[in-house]
Amino acid sequence: MRNLINTIKNIFAIEDLRVRILNTLGFLLVYRIGSYIVLPGVDPNALAAAHGNGDSGILGLINIFAGGAFSRAAIFGLGIMPYISASIVMQLLGIAVPYFQKLQKEGTSGQKKIERYTRVLTVFVTAFQAPGYIASQIPASAMTGPVGVFFYIRSTLILVAGTVFVMWLGEKITDKGIGNGISLIIMVGILARLPFAFTAELFGNRMKSDGGGLIVFLVEIVFLVLVVMATILLVQGTRKIPVQFAKRIVGNKQYGGARQFIPLKVNAAGVMPIIFAQAIMFLPLTVFTSLSGTSTAMSGLVATFSNIGGFWYNLTFGLMIVAFTYFYTAVIINSNQMAEEMKRNGGFVPGIKPGKKTAEHIDAVMSRITLPGSVFLACVAIMPAIAMQFKVDNQFARFYGGTSLLILVGVMMDTLQQIESYLLMRHYDGLMKTGRIKGRTSLSGPGVAAA
């Protein structure tokens, strides 16, 4: 306890770090307040009665990311998800369109142009999603006034402005605060649901006469800690490929010659395979539901894949995650570009020829580590369903794995790594007495990280 108190004192003794932490908390507080401000003309009580807990399917996933603002029809109802969608589109364009490939190679100036395009695309995505969101999520019973074109236009403008404001908050947190702003906003939205899930599991489930009592709840907490530890291993796991740089002598000084490493992550795709798999499984299910009345077989198919705790649902879900992990890793890891940049900077993998042979070697290593990484990711994704089989409350079970847990672990590790960097830079002890917190992105230079 004394070490923890000393660490907190050291953190707030650094003025720059103290100001950044307070700025971050202030910006996040503004976001949480906005997530409770309901759109004009909407009755929040009637809306809550119509939606229930609002935590099912892909819409439930979006609601968790938005911190409950999605089901409350708040001004931040669409949250940061349109920005994430626009970012994914821009990332894919950077692979398929030569113009955006050129921008990616232009460094800071190109990145600023890509960010500008992403902001503009975010506005269009939000304007496209907002009318559908209003029509599907706000029933007529929850509206206090007449529903007409003016209501849709006004609500759409408010939702677009809300998403743009949340995007601005994220950029301000990154600039004036600590950590990645967009990731922190998502993390806060997820954490906002934790107290409700915790209370529902403890008092609404385990403290019942047939719930098992406090002992069973403590066992669940222990297993949750073990799952979090395993997820940290998945997020932090890397395979280092040694890289040797040629020596250069300029005057009386020698440059280069040091051995560095390419850190290839076991889970390079992050949470994207889970998000893609959930979306792919949800959309066909919607079509099958509309056709379920036409045949008995179709009705059985809908019943099978609507049960998120069922065997066939989770088997299909896991296999799709493995497939999408390979696909997304191939999209974001460009071995040819890494090999060319190493060759241009005078680097080579010991025992491997520069150029094409190096690219093939990186591909081979990535293929080997992606298989266990994808299987582990699939296991983490279906952990909530396994927890539900042991009669864990649905809300609390979501924190046993899936997208929520991966985002929480990844963002917290990144933020703690930045705080530790400030402490070490000011000659304080780090957050831990032994070892150092490793960030998820430790690249220094073109595809190469220092040892």
Image (cartoon, rainbow, N blue to C red):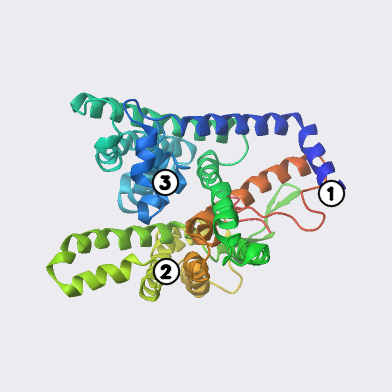
Of tags 2 and 1, the one toward the viewer is 2
The residue at which mark 3 appears reads as: 63
Tags 2 and 1 touching, CB below 8 Å: no
Quarter-wise, where is residue 38 in the image?
top left
**Mark 2 neighbour density, 10 Å: few (under 14) some (14–19) many (20 or more):** some
Secondary structure under tag 3 reads helix
Residue depicted at x 56% and y 34%: 28
**3D distance between C-alphas at marks 1 and 3:** 36 Å
Q: Is residue 252 left or right of residue 321?
A: right
**Is residue 439 something that shows in the picture?**
yes
- Type of amino acid at the residue the image marks with label 3: Asn
- Type of amino acid at the residue the image marks with label 2: Gly
Query: Is the residue 131 above or below the residue 436 in the image?
Result: above
**Is residue 83 something that shows in the picture?**
no
The residue at which mark 1 appears reads as: 1
Q: Residue furthest right?
A: 2
Query: Is the residue 49 above or below the residue 441 in the image?
Result: above
**3D distance between C-alphas at marks 3 and 2:** 20 Å
Secondary structure under tag 2 reads loop
The residue at which mark 2 appears reads as: 309
Quarter-wise, where is residue 349 in the image?
bottom right
Query: Is the residue 95 above or below the residue 304 in the image?
Result: above
